[in-house]
Amino acid sequence: MWTRNTKYRQAKEGLLHAWSFQFADRKKKKRTMRNLWTIKINAAARENGTTYSKLINKLLKAHVELDRKILADIAENDPETFKKIVSSI
C-alpha cells in the first residue's frame, strides 16, 4: 500500500510534503498559542470584573510593558498578582 519506505521517488515526494506541512504548522502554532493566551487572560479578567478588550486597552494606555504570554502565565499561575495588576490600572 504505502511504498515510501522502499521507493525513492515516493520517499522524496513524502519528504517534500512533510517539509511544507512543517513550515505551515510552525506558523499555525504561533496563532494557536496567542489564541490560548487570549482565552486565559479573558477568563482571569472576567473573574476580576473586566473583559479582555478593556483590560488590554487600559494596559496600553497605562504603558504597561507586559505581553500576552506573560499576562497569561501570571493569570494562570499567580492569580493574586494578576488581581493586583488589574486593580492598579
Image (tube, helix red, strand yellow):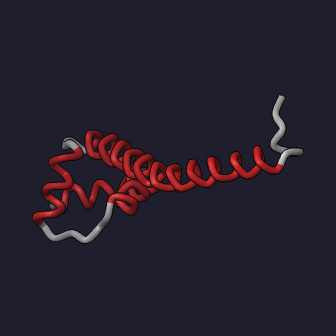
The answer to whether 23 appears left or right of 30 in the picture is right
Q: Nearer the viewer, residue 88 or 69?
A: 69
The answer to whether 42 appears left or right of 34 in the picture is left
Q: Residue furthest left?
A: 61
Q: Position of residue 71 (x, y in %)?
A: 35, 59
Please report the residue visible at 44 percent of the width from the left and 51 percent of the height from the top.
33
Please report the residue visible at 19 percent of the width from the left and 52 percent of the height from the top.
55
Please report the residue visible at 19 percent of the width from the left and 56 percent of the height from the top.
87
Count numbered badges in the picture: 0
Q: Quadrant of residue 51?
A: top left
Q: Nearer the viewer, residue 7 or 71?
A: 7
In the image, residue 19 sits, relative to residue 48, either above or below, namely: below
Q: Residue furthest right?
A: 6
Please report the residue visible at 62 percent of the width from the left and 47 percent of the height from the top.
17
Q: Position of residue 70 (x, y in %)?
A: 39, 63
Q: Residue furthest front?
A: 9
Q: Quadrant of residue 73?
A: bottom left
Q: Position of residue 29 (x, y in %)?
A: 49, 51
Q: Nearer the viewer, residue 40 or 88?
A: 40
Image quadrant in which the N terminus is located: top right
Image quadrant in which the C terminus is located: bottom left
The answer to whether 70 appears left or right of 3 in the picture is left
Q: Position of residue 81 (x, y in %)?
A: 35, 60
